[in-house]
Image (cartoon, grey):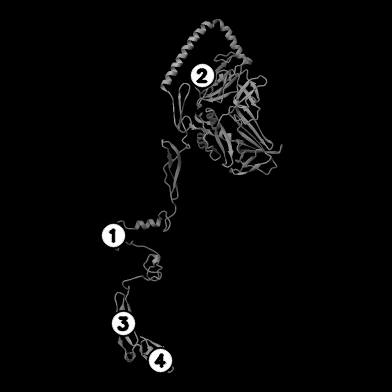
Amino acid sequence: MADICYTDSRRTDVGVLLGASLNVEWGDSGNDFELSVDISSPVRLDDGALVYVEGTEWGGVVDAREASATDGLMRYTGRSWHGVLRDRILCPDAGADYLSVSGEANSVLLSLVSRMGLGDVMTVSAVQSGISVRHRFDRYTDAYSGIRAMLAASGARLGISYDSRAGRAVLSAVKVADWSDGPTSDTADVDVKRVGRPYNHLICLGSGELRNRVVQHWYADAEGRVSSKQSLFGIDERATVYDYTNASAEQLSQDGPKKLAEYQTADVLEATLGFDGSYAVGDVVPGVDEDTGTEVSVTVGTVDVTVTADGVTATYRAGGTAASGSSASSAESSGGGASYAAGDGISIVGRTIYADVTQAKLDTVSATAAKASSEVTGVATDLSREAEARRAADEKIASDVASRVSSVRASGPLTAQTDESMAVVVAHDASGVAAGSYGPAADSEPSFGGKVTLGPRISVDSRGHVTAAQGRSLTIPAATATESAAGLMSAADKRALDAAPTAYQPAGDYAAASHVHDASDVETGVLPVERGGTGDATGNARSASRLQRARKVTLEGAVAGSAYFDGSSDVTITCEGQGAAAGFLAAHPVGSVFESTSAVSPAGSYGGTWRRVPSLGPFRWERTA
């Protein structure tokens, strides 16, 4: 059973719709879908949500909704993937008459998806298709019709499948399947509608307005011969309009008869394919009309698929009919790629040519042959001579061509081929570079923090072909430079830079005329090492030749003397004795022991350095310095 999945408006998967019914139609008509959900279901789909069946082309984007109280259903409608392409127009580049493409089919499809801005919902298979295209699109054609025409000219069709992992519909170029040679060639049931009386009066409308518009009338007789003379009237006349906008009278006189001749192919059939096979739009399907025994091969034009909880059903309708109504064209239109024209009784489906001859035509040929039998001898001789001369001329032309061009070869990225007339067709593979503009569109004056578009980064192969191009941009920094981070110069720094001298100045004259700064936070008077100074953590210098200010050293006590010391040289202090103290110290040199009844050190009275030593009687003091 196929699961019908859905997303939210941001195209994020939500879940599976249970009990829902999905009908999708695409090809020559429709290109839309209808999703039916029970109105009592709590599930509601957003506008812009995607509906899909994984790995198939059944799905699209939700555009509208309708709640029906009559049947209790909520219906969501929208464009199928084919309808999304149909709603895009392929416009020529500025200054060009037509949009032309060539190269590997999938590469061309990828460039078209990018050109249309559909990269968020569509992508293209990365696998090489093995199909080369060279096509010139009709002016301002819708993308779906244009892509189908481009691929059909190379015997291919458009394949679409949704990939939930990529979150996009994947396009690819696929070879057209011709079921005429397959196991189903004798099993497809067809409903045949023979058009025995096609349109025989074509009113062609060209350029101009109202009474000044170019109008031509072309007629077909009972045998299907086209001329400007009418031979069928009354109920036998069938007229239709060919609106060929902007065509001149000369162009209308060429294309009008061709269009009417297309209607005269009485053996062109309408067919509804009853076989529930895996046919795709563009495939060639054979069948047999059980009533008349007519064998017919038709191209699938429309596919109609319905997905329910019970399974999947599909119906197929053939493309093209000889009984269609009025048609339109444009004088600016011109198809691209290979094109072929079919004569009376001949039809071309895909790359297969079919010839059908009705009994009426056989009877006409038989009668004509009987009437001409009496005259055939002389005519046959003339025809034989003419045929021989024509054959000789053809052989000479072929010989001349063969002598000039023996073979045509090409290597990637070029492909070359010749047709029966030895016409050479050379195509160039797609470069792989998406169409569009690269580099800045105009000069710019970005501010701080702004972004500037630079020239593209281009990859070129050994043959000089551009194989890749990516746009590049430059963002200007917005941050101001600091001691630890790069950035732009601040306004204050710029003012300081402008105040600096620009020419030589004598020593001591480098300071600005005036400046303002915060008070110093250095308390020791010396800048510490971590602040860029020469001091240590306490602020003291590690080394110095002299003190900044000399210090006075004074001796007191039994001797007296003083000197100034700045650290630049040694200092000798001359001392003088002070009376009894001097005599006492002279009598008690270092090492002497002095006994006293006082527990107070004699240093207080006489100077010197003393230490108390153990004693059982008086206090004893030993001089140590």
Q: Residues within 10 Å of mark 2 (few under 14, many from 20)?
A: some
| Amino acid bearing label 2 | Ser
The numbered mark at residue 505 is: 1
* Distance from Cα at disc 3 to Cα at disc 1: 48 Å
Looking at marks 4 and 2 on the same chain, the residue that comes earlier in the sequence is marked by: 2
Eyeballing the image, is 188 above or below 432? above
Residue contact between numbered discs 3 and 1, judged by CB atoms under 8 Å: no
The location of residue 252, given as percent across then percent down, is 51, 20
* Distance from Cα at disc 4 to Cα at disc 2: 152 Å
Q: Residues within 10 Å of mark 3 (few under 14, many from 20)?
A: some
Q: Residues within 10 Å of mark 4 (few under 14, many from 20)?
A: many
Residue corresponding to mark 4: 620
**Quadrant hosting residue 205:** top right
Eyeballing the image, is 555 above or below 161? below
| Amino acid bearing label 4 | Arg
Residue corresponding to mark 3: 562
Eyeballing the image, is 360 above or below 417? above
Residue corresponding to mark 2: 253
* Distance from Cα at disc 1 to Cα at disc 4: 76 Å
Looking at marks 2 and 1 on the same chain, the residue that comes earlier in the sequence is marked by: 2
